[in-house]
Image (cartoon, rainbow, N blue to C red):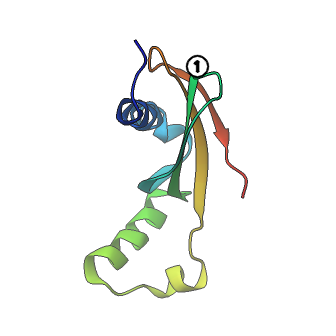
Amino acid sequence: MTIDVRQAVSSAKNHLNQIIDLFGYIDDIRLEEIELSSDKKSWFITLGFHLFNSPIDKQKNSLKKETGIPNLANLLNPTEREYKVIEIDAETGDLKSIKIREL
């Protein structure tokens, strides 16, 4: 039985969340792209997020969200979005790979 697109996205997010601490501190995870391979054996799910080097960086960014006021550090050094392509097995929902998505 093949998993559907919603299950593939959910699986990709779950796999990313399981290893999120290996990347640093991640915030604002968003679905960016979805692709089913031509042989229908893999889903390629692109997730975008902000990556912070430390919990302090993340706290500075959350202040902006809470107050609506960007702090000076964020204006001078905004974090760019990072993108990962997560390959999910279309039959099982298992993780096959996580790769950097180049723009």
Q: What residue is at 26 percent from the left and 76 percent from the top? A: 66
Q: Is residue 31 left or right of residue 62?
A: right
In the rendered image, residue 73, in percent from the top left (x then y), is placed at 52, 82
Residue 17, quarter of the rendered image = top left
Residue farthest to the front?
Answer: 38
The C terminus - image quarter: bottom right
- Is residue 75 positioned above or below 99 on the image? below
In the rendered image, residue 53, in percent from the top left (x then y), is placed at 56, 57
Residue 41, quarter of the rendered image = top right
The residue that mark 1 highlights is 41
Q: What residue is at 39 percent from the left and 33 percent from the top? A: 14
- Is residue 39 positioned above or below 32 on the image? above
Residue 55, quarter of the rendered image = bottom left
Q: Is residue 49 left or right of residue 1?
A: right
Secondary structure category for the residue under label 1: loop
The N terminus - image quarter: top left
Q: What residue is at 31 percent from the left and 84 percent from the top? A: 68
- Is residue 54 positioned above or below 47 on the image? below
In the rendered image, residue 87, in percent from the top left (x then y), is placed at 58, 30
Crowd class of label 1 (few under 14; some 14 to 19; many from 20; radius 10 Å): some
Q: What residue is at 32 percent from the left and 74 percent from the top? A: 65
Q: Is residue 89 left or right of residue 38?
A: left
Residue farthest to the top?
Answer: 1
Which residue type does callout 1 highlight? Answer: Lys
Q: Nearer the viewer, residue 88 or 27?
A: 88
